Image (spheres, helix red, strand yellow):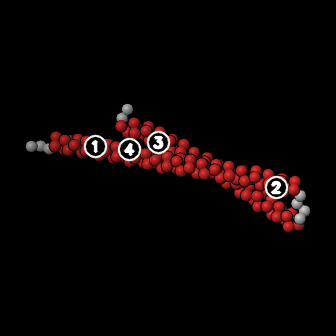
Amino acid sequence: MSKIQTVSKILQIKEHKKEQAELEVKKITSLINKAEDKLSSLEKKFIETTEVFHQKQKSGTASIDEIGLFYNYFSQLNNEMSAKKKEISERHKELNIRQNELIEAYKEKRVFETLRDGIVARDIKEKDISEQKEMDFMFLAKMKY
């Protein structure tokens, strides 16, 4: 296998690696967006429930059982929000790792593209030199001394 074919095969592998990294980054970004949407929804529920709770307290219609139910619901929402925040934080760390891998994949691909271009340019130059030598030989062979 010639150098250009070898480099082209490696370049295909690097391109595939880059595409895989891009897909992983998109997937993680999608997961982060979904988790952030869920967190936003939980926070909205928490705020709405807090307002209802404060209205009941101000009006004096909240019984001890209702206060206990509100407390349990607040605890549940708080636990869910904490879990989502932790999940988002972990996903962001994973995203940073995958983005760094993607950058490395781009760099590796670019290195092999440069190498391939150099090999092609060198091959063209060698071919041109060879053709020029052949033409010079033919010219000299036709000359009469």
Q: Quick one: label 4 or label 1, which is nearer the N terminus? A: 4
Exactly how many numbered labels are in the figure? 4
The answer to the question of whether label 2 and label 4 lie on touching residues, with beta carbons closer than 8 A, is: no
Quarter of the C terminus within the rendering = top left
Residue 127's place in the image compared with 69, above or below, is above
Task: Give the residue type at disc 2.
Answer: Phe
Neighbours of disc 4 within 10 Å: few (<14), some (14-19), many (20+): many
For marks 2 and 4, the one nearer the N-term is 2
Q: Secondary structure at mark 4?
A: helix
- Which callout, 2 or 4, points to the residue nearer the camera? 2
**Kind of residue indicated by mark 3:** Lys
Q: Residue at x 68, y 49 (%)?
A: 83
Q: Residue 116: which numbered mark, if any?
A: 4
* Badge 4 amino acid: Arg
For this orientation, the residue located farthest to the right is 61
Quadrant assignment, res 59 = bottom right
Residue 3 vs residue 104, the one in the foreground: 104
Pick whichever of labels 1 and 2 is earlier in the sequence.
2
Amino acid type, label 1: Glu
Residue at the front extreme? 64
Seen at 67% across and 54% down, the residue is 36
Which numbered mark, 1 or 2, is in the foreground of this view? 2
Q: Is residue 57 above or below residue 125?
A: below
Q: Which residue is mark 2?
A: 70
Q: Is residue 71 left or right of residue 145?
A: right
In front: label 2 or label 3: 2
In the rendered image, which residue does mark 1 sit on? 126
